[in-house]
Image (cartoon, coloured by chain):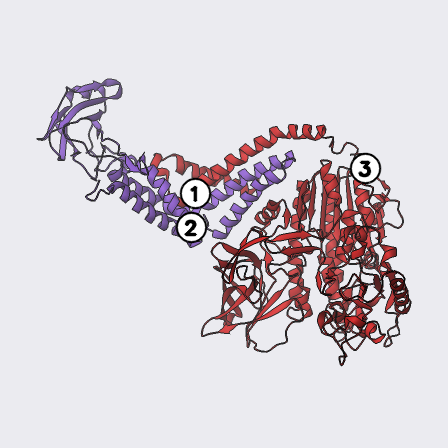
Amino acid sequence: MGPLGVNVPAGIVVAISLIIGLVMVIVFGYTSDQKAIHVAKDRLKAHLLALRLFQDQIHVVLRSYGRIVLATGHYLRLAFKPLLFVIVPMTLLIVQLDRYLGSVPLVTGQSFLIKARMDSPESLNEATLQLPQGLTTSAPAVHVPSENEVAWRVVAAKAGEYNINVHVSDQSFSKSVVVGSGLLRLSSTRLRGKFWERIFVSGESALPENKFIQAIAVQYPDRNIAFAGIEWNWIWLFFVLSLAAGFLFKSILGIEI
Amino acid sequence: MRLEHRRTLMYLAILAIILLCPQHGHAYAGPGAGFAVLSSFWTLFVAFLYSVYAFFVWPFRQLFRLLRRRKAYGKAQIKRAVILGFDGMDPELTERFIAEGRLPNMAKLRGQGTFRKLRTTYPAISPVAWSTFMTGVNPGKHNIYDFLARDLANYLPYLSSAEIKGPKRSWKIGKYTIPLGGPRIKGMRKGIPFWHWLGEAGIFCSVLRVPVTFPPEKFSGVLLSGMCVPDLKGSQGTFCLCTTRLSGDKFREGGVRVPIERSAAQCSSYVPGPEDPLTGSSDDELRVSFQIFPDLGKSQARFTVDGEKFTLKVGEYSDWIPVRFKAGIGFSAHGICRFYLKELSPEIEVYVTPVNIDPSRPDLPISHPVTYSIYLSKLFGPYATLGLAEDTWALNEKVLDDNAFLAQCYANHDDRERMLFDALEKTQQGLCACVFDTTDRVQHMFWRYLDDDHPAAREVPRDQRPMVIQDLYTRMDELIGRVMKKIDEQTLLMIVSDHGFKSFNRCVNLNAWLHQNGYLALKSGKTESGDWFDDVDWSRTRAYTMGLNGLYLNLKGREREGIIEPGADADALKGELRQKLDGLTDPASGRVGITGVFDCDAVYAGPYVDNAPDLIVGYGDGFRASWDSVMGKVTSQIFEDNLKAWSGDHCIDPRLVPGVLFCNHKISEEKPAIVDVAPTVLKLFGLALPRHLDGKPWTVALSAAP
């Protein structure tokens, strides 16, 4: 909650949803063939009405259903062009928002896991964790050879932004860990290579090229946003609210979706 | 697989990859894509559920029918009947054009099946004849005698087919009246259309634009109402001429002139709509304003109408434009109209069609079920719903020229064809009936080019006259050809017209004749009356006429100021009028203007005979009731030239204007009548004929069993 009792993440999601809803509807309006979409939707409705009007004529019902499938495909095809214009910026935007809204920072006094995924099971014994002041391990490292993974259970004594290091064979690999509260930019994983995957799941630069370690991950808890009496994952709330905003603005602006 | 489908599948595959491959939340690409995907899946889901429902319920519905003894097609001799109504198609012209080789498909039908003249009704007017067509009874049983009927209380006309009143209840607040409920619509046509009986027997029917089907009646099938559907103003069609010309005669009927206000870069005007339901005053009409942005260099103008933007070149029509007349919060009327840019310089003139009821959001019921008009609109786009959709008045008043009128007619005709072929596809078994009005409207307006000496076309040299009617018949023949390709041996195809056509070059003002012969009196000092008997002295009037063929006695106890005693006096007066009028000759041409006067007591029988005129006047070839006489006006001249584009007509002696009957099977009846169509179709579908029918079923030689 904010200083005035306002649910800040919910407020941010609402505001973003309204803005995105408006912008995307306008973009859709300009980049789509509005007349063709109108006609395609009308045809769909006509075939649906045919199911009802000619319900005793089985051949009409079956043929109408086939036409509905084709008309739906045609409609989706028309929606595809504006989709091309918005999908890249929207994806990047959502990924960035997810850094802030997808998870909450770690809490002092509560243990969490740091996992390192290695290239081979042999490297598991060589990996050690070096923690800055304020973070301590609360249990010995656990090796999972089947997954090439080693995990440490860690507890934070105080809030702050830390860098932990995993040492393997004279090399050190760092990863950020955020402990605190509020809306902070979080990155759950640091990856070696994997450019496309990094765009979607990592907010940090790539691990340096090496032969031992593929990824270091910190498990941040998921953020739940209270809105309208329901606990939401932000992406679902954004989905619902931006659809509602889109519906509102399309009617106001007279744009066919 | 068609290229279109292949491309659709390819796009679908790409879309699926984009949507499915990224991690869950990142697949969402904004509300546009969200709507598209959600609504598509929803549509498919609903459609699938409904298809499954229909598939499984179908046997139970069939069983239910059997239990109700509605075993469809059990005794049927045919699987399907397709009836194409070509309003006003003339048998003599048809024979002539067949002989000239213009109509190969009709020639084929004549050779393989049947071609006959079809006896029409008394009078030979479309609403009368089509009512008889659908009910199988004479007008005395269906109550339609003309487009107009007269109010006995005040001698004023009203529409004979339907009555539209305001809502039953309303709430008055100061000068405003809040209507509580929709308008009340009462159909005046009596009798039961034959598709009602077919539906009862479980035989599906698709009925398109058959006249006098407004308001639509419930039955087992689908129906789109035809002639007599009003426009949004409640009239039978009121066009609008928006103009910067300050002067101009008021249109006699069918149109209004609206000023265009000019400013620096744009002009503005409005489309007049219905009266404001909140004030209930005809002075307070609702309006939709529009703007015109002329571009003289390109001979075009941009229009902004109710949020719609479009550009028209001079001589070009717009698509159907939706217009919404707002009367206040929650009160609005939805219509559609087309704009035609007549002129841009030096003056600006824009013709606007009558505002049709929007078929996708009908404020009045124009189809059964209501969703049928919506279905057609969604499938084919907006279409004309007005009963008399082809604006003959605008051509008569020279607001439209020949080409603009024809473009309008054929645009409507093309829509009708699309509807017909959809109905043919949907009705593989049962009845498919569709009436085309183009044949009637085009012949009315272009007969002047067929008539060697028509007063309305004397200035056009014979060798320069367009072949409009020839082209019309050719077009209808091509339509028949396409329909024939869609039917099989077990389908009965009938082409029916309700009446034929003749030239209308001389007008007869029967009220003038009645006045000059002492049957109709004007108030002292008057030599002519106004419209609708203004200045007629009813206390001294024995007979009068209004509408196209009806002649009425001013009967005591019936008319408000009647003076003729019913019984012997009335019979004597009828006899006297018949004797004097029959054979009435036009002194200018020497031709017979009236070839028969028919006593309604002799030609009609049924419970509604009392509403009929007393006499039906049968005008001779080339004659018709004058424009003034139809509107209850007494003029000084009895005969005069008809100078209007409306130059062909059929409201004459019914014996002179039979319709046509084509059938793809042999019919033995030598003198078939339009009243016989209904019993014939019922019999072919194996139904018992209702006893009250006047028509007799024909014997049809069917070559294959269903």
Discs 3, 2 touching: Cβ within 8 Å: no
Q: Residue A176 in the image: state x and y as whole percent.
A: 17, 34
Discs 1, 2 touching: Cβ within 8 Å: yes
Q: Residue A233 in the image: state x and y as whole percent.
A: 31, 35
Residue to which mark 2 is pinned:
A250
Q: Nearer the viewer, mark 3 or mark 1?
A: 3
| Amino acid beneath label 2 | Lys
Characterize the local packing of mark 1: few (<14), some (14-19) or many (20 or more) Cα atoms within 10 angstroms: some
Of residue B125 and residue B435, the one placed in the foreground of this image is: B125
Distance of mark 1 from mark 2, alpha carbons?
A: 11 Å
Task: State left or right for residue B265 relative to residue B568.
Answer: left
Q: Which mark is residue B35?
A: 1
Q: Colour of chain B?
A: red
Mark yes or no: residue B507 visible: no
Q: Quadrant of residue B5?
A: top right
The chain letter of the purple chain reads: A
| Amino acid beneath label 1 | Phe
Q: Secondary structure at mark 1?
A: helix
Q: Quadrant of residue A182?
A: top left
Q: Secondary structure at mark 2?
A: helix
Residue to which mark 3 is pinned:
B688
Of residue B63 and residue B403, the one placed in the foreground of this image is: B63
Residue B134 to residue B524: above or below: above
Which comes sooner in the sequence, label 3 or label 1? 1
Characterize the local packing of mark 3: few (<14), some (14-19) or many (20 or more) Cα atoms within 10 angstroms: few
- Classify the position of the N terminus of chain A by image quarter: top left
Distance of mark 3 from mark 1, alpha carbons?
A: 54 Å
Of residue A200 and residue B229, the one placed in the foreground of this image is: B229
Q: Residue B95 in the image: state x and y as whole percent.
A: 84, 57
